Image: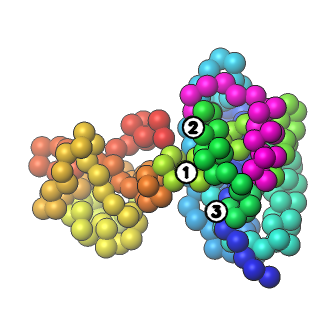
């Protein structure tokens, strides 16, 4: 069977102190797919709107990744995800899952607009279901109120845009410092940008105080760095929170 690019996103609305996070649940799903069906891309975390009307634990973010599936494996993966999240998530969870073949999306821009709206305003489940139906996205609630469908659909939309999201987790390097060209040669990121639109100086080293995180920008993995005295440092988790 022909394989198609597939977007998968979850928003588990986990609870503080629970033994497994939404990111870890997504990692387990990725491992299952990678072992049984397809190579997978890194998971991206997408920050959504923070508002008192939206139930969330601490971040209100969703997770998304892509893989290659055929129509049969799509259904098998869907069944696995629904059963796994139902079993592993907290009893108070109101999770949701979104899945779609990229080729089946009718109007990508409509879906993308929904995703960016989810970063800036309170959305409803009714809207999420309507957009999902129009764009051929499988969308399903998991437990309780199922508010996670709003974020799950947004996760697919924002990943589809190629201009939102940051790496879930971090990449640890063996070296504590590296020239920009040396880092690019490793293939960990596609490009490096200095914040405040300053030009990247190739002879200036990047110093890694901790693992690095890239963001998605222009469908590329971009490392954002800031200027130090005679070196650059990657932006940390807090500075990247908006993504």
Q: Residue at x 83, y 60 (%)?
A: 78
Cα gap from disc 3 to disc 1, whole angstroms = 13 Å
Q: Which mark is residue 99?
A: none
Q: Which mark is residue 66?
A: 3
Q: Residue at x 38, y 55 (%)?
A: 222
Give the image's coloring scheme. rainbow
Image location of residue 26, percent across then percent down: 68, 54
97 relative to 215 in the view: left or right: right
With 119 as the anchor, is 56 left or right in this view? Answer: right
N-term mark: 2 or 3? 3
Contact between marks 2 and 1 (CB within 8 A): the answer is yes
- Label 1: how many Cα within 10 Å (few below 14, some 14–19, many 20+): many
Q: Secondary structure at mark 1?
A: helix
Seen at 18% across and 51% down, the residue is: 199
Residue at the top extreme of this rendering: 52
Marks 2 and 3 sit apart, C-alpha to C-alpha, by 19 Å
Task: Estimate the x, y position of residue 120 in percent, counting from the top left.
Answer: 56, 28
Residue 208, placed above or below residue 184: above
Q: Which residue is disc 1 drawn over?
A: 161
């Amino acid at each position: 069977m022909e394989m198609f690019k597939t977007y998968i996103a979850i928003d588990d609305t986990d609870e503080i102190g629970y033994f497994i996070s939404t990111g870890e649940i997504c990692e387990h799903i990725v491992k299952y797919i990678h072992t049984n069906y397809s190579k997978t891309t890194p998971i991206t975390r997408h920050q959504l709107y923070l508002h008192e009307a939206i139930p969330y634990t601490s971040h209100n973010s969703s997770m998304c990744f892509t893989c290659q599936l055929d129509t049969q494996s799509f259904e098998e993966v869907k069944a696995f995800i629904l059963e796994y999240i139902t079993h592993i998530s907290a009893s108070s969870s109101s999770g949701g899952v979104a899945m779609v073949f990229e080729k089946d999306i009718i109007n990508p821009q409509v879906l993308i607009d929904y995703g960016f709206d989810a970063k800036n305003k309170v959305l409803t489940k009714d809207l999420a279901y309507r957009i999902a139906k129009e764009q051929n996205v499988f969308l399903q609630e998991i437990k309780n109120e199922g508010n996670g469908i709003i974020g799950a659909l947004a996760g697919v939309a924002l990943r589809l845009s190629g201009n939102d999201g940051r790496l879930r987790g971090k990449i640890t390097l063996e070296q504590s410092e590296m020239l920009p060209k040396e880092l690019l040669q490793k293939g960990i990121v596609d490009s490096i940008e200095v914040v405040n639109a300053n030009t990247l100086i190739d002879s200036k080293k990047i110093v890694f105080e901790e693992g690095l995180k890239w963001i998605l920008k222009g469908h590329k993995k971009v490392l954002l760095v800031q200027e130090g005295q005679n070196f650059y440092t990657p932006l940390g988790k807090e500075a990247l929170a908006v993504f």
